Image (cartoon, rainbow, N blue to C red):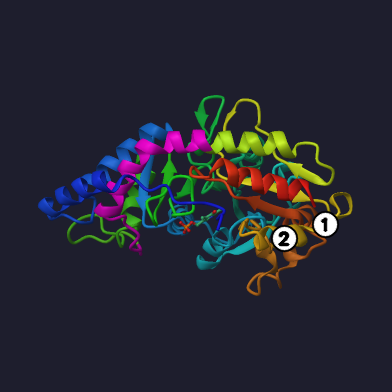
Amino acid sequence: MITVTSPLLPPLEEFQKLLQDIWQRKWITNNGHYHQELEKALAEYLGVPYISLFTNGTLPLITALQALRITGEVITTPYSFVATTHSIWWNGIKPVFVDVDPVTGNLAPDKIEAAITPQTTAIMPVHVYGTPCDTDRIQAIADKYGLKVIYDAAHAFGVRVNGESVLKAGDISTLSFHATKTYNTIEGGALVCSDAALKQRIDYLKNFGFAGETEVVAPGINSKMDEVRSAYGLLSLKYVDSAIATRKAVAEQYRAALRGVPGLRIMEDVPGVTHNYSYFPIFVNASEYGETRDELYFRLQKHNILGRRYFYPLISTFSTYRGLPSATASNLPVATRMANEVICLPLHHELRQEEINSIINLILHR
Ligand SMILES: *Cc1c(COP(=O)(O)O)cnc(C)c1O
C-alpha cells in the first residue's frame, strides 16, 4: 500500500531519553521545560517573532478569531480543509466564500472587494499546498477597509518568500502539526504573531483565560500542548530539513515525468519562494487526458496507490454551509473546477524509487 503521506517519526531511542527526563521532572503539561524549548526552537527555525503552541491546528484558528475579537462576517476560501470554515462557524461568525486563483488555488485577491459588506471584519485566506498567497494585495485590501487578516498556514511550515517567513504576513498565522503534515507533533499546532501583547493574550486564552493563580481575564479554552508532544516536536525538528529535501527530490521526479502530459496540470515552484513540498497536486482535464479524475484516482487505488482528493468536495458544499448565499457553484467556478480535477499524489520522505516509478507509469499509460 502506497499512502499519500507517512509520518515523520523521530528515532525511538532518542525519544525514550527525553521521556525519561520528563518522568524525572514530573512536570508533564502547563508550559513546562519542553514546551518552552519547542517555542524557542520553532520561533528560530521559522524566523518569526512570537509563537504559541497548541494541541492541534484547529484551536489556534478558533483562538485567533477570539483574540482579535472578530465578529459579523469573515471572507474565506471554500478550497481548503473543512477546519478553516468550521473555526469561523464555531465563533458564531458568518463565513463568506470567495473564489480562488486558478494557478495557485489560493483566495483570489481581485474577487475579495466585491464580497465586503458593512459586517465584514476579517479575511481568512489559506496558503494552499504551501504556495504563498498574494499577501501584499490582501494586506492592501485589509488596510483599505480596516479588516484583520488571519492566515490558515497549516500547509506553509517553513515556507519563505525572498528569505522572509510567509508566517509574518497578516495579523496572525496558524500552523497544524498533525501526523499527516510535513512537520508533526502527532497532534499539534501553533499560532504565530508579531506582537508580544497579542502573544500574551493568546497564551491566556489557550489556558482558560488564566492570567494568574486566581485571575481569569477572558473566556478561554484549554488547548495547551503537553510535554510529551513538545519533546517529540523538538526531536522531529532536527529531521524535518532532510525530510523536506527528500520530498523535493520526489516532486522534481514527478514534474520531470508529468510536465507536458496532455490534460494534466502540475504546479511549479514559484521564483523567490522556499517551498516545503508538502503536497503534489495534479489536475486532470478529462477530455484532454482521456480519463476523468475519479477514473484515474480509482485506477491508482486498484494498484494500491492511495492519492487523496485534496480538496474535494468543496467546504461550501457541506450541509452546514451549502445554504449560504456565497456557497453556490456559480459564485465559485474556479474552486469548483479545481475540486473536481485534483488528486494529490503520494509524497513523503520514505517513498521508494520503484514506488515513484510505478505511480508515474500508471499515470502516463492510461
Ligand atoms: C490540517 C489542516 C487544518 C487542521 O489542523 P488539525 O491539526 O488537524 O486540527 C486546518 N487547515 C488546513 C488547511 C489543514 O490542512
User: On screen, 317 above or below 288?
Assistant: below
**Residue indicated by mark 2:** 299
- On whether residue 280 falls in the magenta region, the answer is no
- x and y, in percent, of residue 254 in the image: 66, 39
Tell me the distance, in whole angstroms, between the alpha carbons under discs 2 and 1: 10 Å
Image coordinates for residue 96, horizontal then vertical, percent: 67, 60
Residue lying at the far left in this picture: please name it.
24
Q: On residue 291, which mark appears?
A: 1
Question: Residue 333's quadrant in the figure?
Answer: bottom right
Answer yes or no: disc 1 within 8 Å of ligand 1: no
| Dot 2 alpha-carbon crowd within 10 angstroms: few under 14, some 14 to 19, many 20 or more | some
Which amino acid is tagged 1? Glu
| Residue 168 in view, yes or no | no
Q: Is residue 102 left or right of residue 84?
A: right
Answer whether residue 325 is visible to the viewer in this image.
yes
Residue at 63% in and 73% down? 320
Q: Secondary structure at mark 2?
A: helix
In the depicted structure, whether residue 89 falls above or below residue 117: below
307 is higher (above) or lower (below) than 273: below
To which quarter of the image does residue 298 belong? Answer: bottom right
Cβ–Cβ below 8 Å for labels 2 and 1? yes
Residue 305, located in which quarter of the rendered image?
A: bottom right
Quarter in which the N terminus is drawn: bottom right
Residue stretch in magenta: 219-246
- Tell me which amino acid carries mark 2: Arg
Q: Earlier in the sequence, mark 2 or mark 1?
A: 1
